[in-house]
Amino acid sequence: MTDLEAALRRAVRGEVGFDVTSRALTTMDASNYRRVPLGVVAPRDADDVAAVLEVCREHGVPVVARGGGTSIAGQATGTGVVVDFTRHMNRLVSLDAEARTAVVQPGLVLDRLQDAAAPHGLRFGPDPSTHSRCTLGGMIGNNSCGSHSVAWGTTADSVRELTVLTARGKWLRLGQEWAGAPDGLRDLVDGGLARLRTGFPDLPRRISGYALDALLPERGADVARSFCGSEGTLGVLTEASVRLVEAPRARALAVLGYTDEAGAAEAAAGLLPYGPLTVEGMAADLVPSTEGLPRGGAWLFVETGGDSEAEARARAEAIVRAADVVDARVVTDPAGQRTLWRVREDASGTATRMPDGAEAWPGWEDCAVPPARLGAYLRDFRALLTSHGLRGTPYGHFGDGCIHVRIDFDLLTDAGVARFRRFSEELADVVVAHGGSLSGEHGDGQARAELLPRMYGEETVALFERAKAVWDPDDLLNPGMLVRSAPLDTNLRFSVLPREPVDVAFGYPSDGGDFSAAVRRCVGVAKCRTTSVSGTGVMCPSFRATGEEEHSTRGRARLLHEMLAGELVTDGWRSTEVRDALDLCLSCKGCRSDCPVEVDMATYKAEFLHHHYAGRRRPAAHYAMGRLPVWLRWAARVRVARVVNALASVGPLAAVAKRLGGIAAERDLPRLAREPFTRWWRGRRSSPDRPGDLVVLWPDTFTEHLSPSVGRAAVRVLEAAGLRVALPPTLRGRARVGDGTSKSSAALLSTRRGRVCCGLTYVSTGQLDQARAVMRRTLDLMAPVLETSAPVVVLEPSCAAALRTDLPELLHDDPRAARLAARVLTFAEALERHAPHWTPPAVDRPVTGQTHCHQHAVLGDAPDRRLREAAGLTGELTGGCCGLAGNFGFEKGHYEVSAACAEDRLLPAVREAPEDAVVLADGFSCRTQLEQLAGVRGRHLAEVLAERLGQE
């Protein structure tokens, strides 16, 4: 391997990675399979690709071309050299709007092509649900389709010419009429014309095997089309000329409700004569919530297009009239359509968990049958599942007869794997009996190639092997895929994981307390690899800032998987590779909500840091910022805020403090409040008794010591809404929560003092023993509150999220933790639930800013939206993460990434806002980032409302 690596480094101008991290990141795709490569190369151009092939040919090492790594059959994994096209060869070379063509490099993400084509009223027809991260090269390799295939076909239907390099270094330009055909291919076809004309099922979604029938003379002898779906086994694509189609000016979405899945499936084929753009189907067992959907137990999503909204709607309504439905809904509003489509697109992830939380896996992800046979096939499929004691939730492209499904295979035990094989063999026979294809979209890879003789017969498969030998006589390119494949039950990625639960601190309630199961959540759909985020989405800010796989949620999950496996990452919790990959995780929690399978990398990072630094010295930032509540309480107790602020304003002294505390030199130290919030509370004049509900206002560390104006504003608004405000007790023991009208918030029967704290800073730095101690002390202090029905109002979103999730998951053995978590309300939630008839003051101004990432991921912002609307605050807040993220943006070495995250969504939104816009930022980190990077003062919603109260 050393000679190979050295040779590649001499020959290639792009990056060559034979290190543990580079290899670990590419051991898996989105399938059940795992292979450990020797190394990874990111070529800069086609000459680099040629150099890689030459070196690997000389060393007898296989080559695997890889795009977004979202393949579901294992074809993007290999034991040789992986060629990653996403880093450099990702350009749109040209776009000819008049000719409706584009020239692309293989690493170009589909959405980037769509963005470039859209201003011309054009688009690329196929659109898999992974459109925001899959690449054109991968789509050509798999002959991908997507939801619009009933209108625009497969990727092969959109390909004009392909520039391909063979394993032996020959450049070919593939096209029609035998253009670019390698020597011997035409003779092979001429000798098998009868078999090619009769041995291939005639259905729209036949993806399995090689498309040798595209080489028939009556089909134009299209070598480029025949190459599509070859899964990188015939040649390496370096450039493609593709066709674009005219995009409808307007669209309508008809959602048709049916009694059950079979009814929807049988109706789908009958809708095709109406010329829909899509006919997608899914059943109720895949939908977490039916809100917004018409009545029924299954639905068809039928999209229509037109030159105007009225024309598109008319076509949709015609389909509704023609369909025999239980109920229907037609949506023309683009935002409403996106919301509904998101349910369908996320199915590839949500289907990986059964309703009871059991794991489900691909392997039989995309069989296809003639559309008219779909209803009968689904009944047989369900019956076969039942006979094997398995469960699955089918969904997919009903109009093309293609079904996606994840099945709750047990791939962890020998008995479960044996059942996986038996089921696979029997289902292959069922598919063939219905005239279908084992793959209708994602290719065969290792998952189905072994079973191709059942579909095509031995003679046709032998023809496939001969075709492979014509293109790649040395079997250098992606060996073991499509032909001469490894058995479908080998190389399973689960086989290397520990069989016994790993000793961990968090409870992982959704994974049965099993950290391995939590890590297995990442199935590789790679929604975290999107280069742009829409709406209020967050995930994954560090990937968007760096573009590096290791800084994506998937990349980190892969490294954790390899850490548990112990084969490639060999030093377990002490791994520096895992530590370095997690270093740029902002703990924004965006993946907890945005990832379709709810991977929670913030928790995994805290868990890892807890073990990694156990018994060892930590980075200085962990002591300086992880224990921030201690230092701030000390400063408040001895009343040195003014002195500390003065010293921090002296450049040399501030520089020394930052260096000692592991703080980025580019950062300004936040100023401490002269009067902490609770000191103001104790000194405020008593309020008259109020009849309203009692709410307990949480004095989080940031509100208490750094921005007490937020707390004061919240008290004012809550009381104006008729609520009684109290603070948590500060002494342990039996206590009575006060009514908020006196200077003390509790009648105390003990003398042991303490302060409540959510433990956030300890959790984010992985100091979980200290976090648990702080949390238990907090639960002791909150005991009197838990005896009442009073909610706990938390103003800082990150602290509210910590109390809602980290507290019960870290103290899973203490029932009080769940009780307190259930009491936590945001500022807007408290007003909505406990002062529903209160009308906020009219602000009547536009807003800009960003929804806090923890609020988006854990708390939700619907009450905030309604409160803003009631106050006349118009406009939407952007998504993403501010980039400061508590301690992250302050830590040495994080400044550039922190600033890049802010430039992703937050700062552009603020710059583009109207001059009179209110800049909303409920989180202290967000406000600090705005102030330090843009010189803009962001305000908590409570401050905005309180200010307006004084003007009425």
Image (cartoon, rainbow, N blue to C red):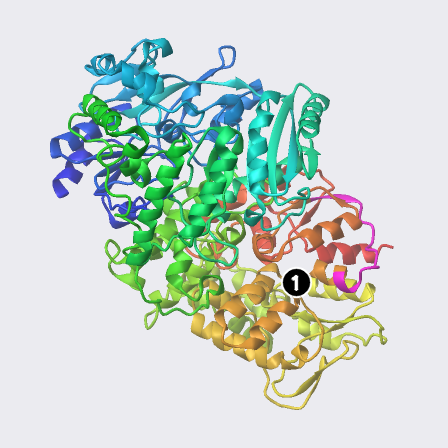
- Location of residue 546 by image quarter: top left
Residue 127 in view here: no
Residue at (44, 64) in percent of width and height: 765
What residue sits 26% from the left and 58% below the top? 566
Screen quadrant of the C terminus: bottom right
Left or right, 718 with reference to 622: right
Q: Residue at x 66, y 43 (%)?
A: 293
Which range of residues does the magenta coloring cover? 833-847
Q: Which of 498 and 398 is in front in this view?
A: 398
Q: In this view, does 252 lie above or below 635?
A: above
Label 1, secondary structure: give it. loop
The residue positioned 64% from the left and 55% from the top of the image is 922
> Mark 1, residues whose alpha carbon is within 10 Å: few (<14), some, or many (≥20)?
many
Residue 203 in the image, given as x and y percentages of width and height = 43, 25
The spot of residue 247 in percent (x, y) is 57, 21
Three-letter amino acid code of the residue under disc 1:
Leu
Q: Which residue lies furthest to the right in this view?
A: 952
Asked if residue 219 is among those painted magenta in the image, a careful observer would answer: no
Image coordinates for residue 817, horizontal then vertical, percent: 56, 73
**Residue 839 falls within the magenta-colored stretch:** yes
User: Would you identify the image quadrant in which residue 941 lies?
Assistant: bottom right
According to the image, label 1 marks what residue? 795
Compared with residue 24, is residue 120 higher up or lower down, i.e. above or below?
Answer: above
**Screen quadrant of the N terminus:** top left
* Picture layout, residue 79 above or below residue 723: above
Relative side of 517 to 731, left or right: left
Residue 414 visible (yes or no)? yes
Residue 908 image offset from top left, x and y in percent: 59, 39
The relative height of residue 111 versus residue 845 in the rendered view (above or below) is above
The prevailing secondary structure element of the residues shown in magenta is loop
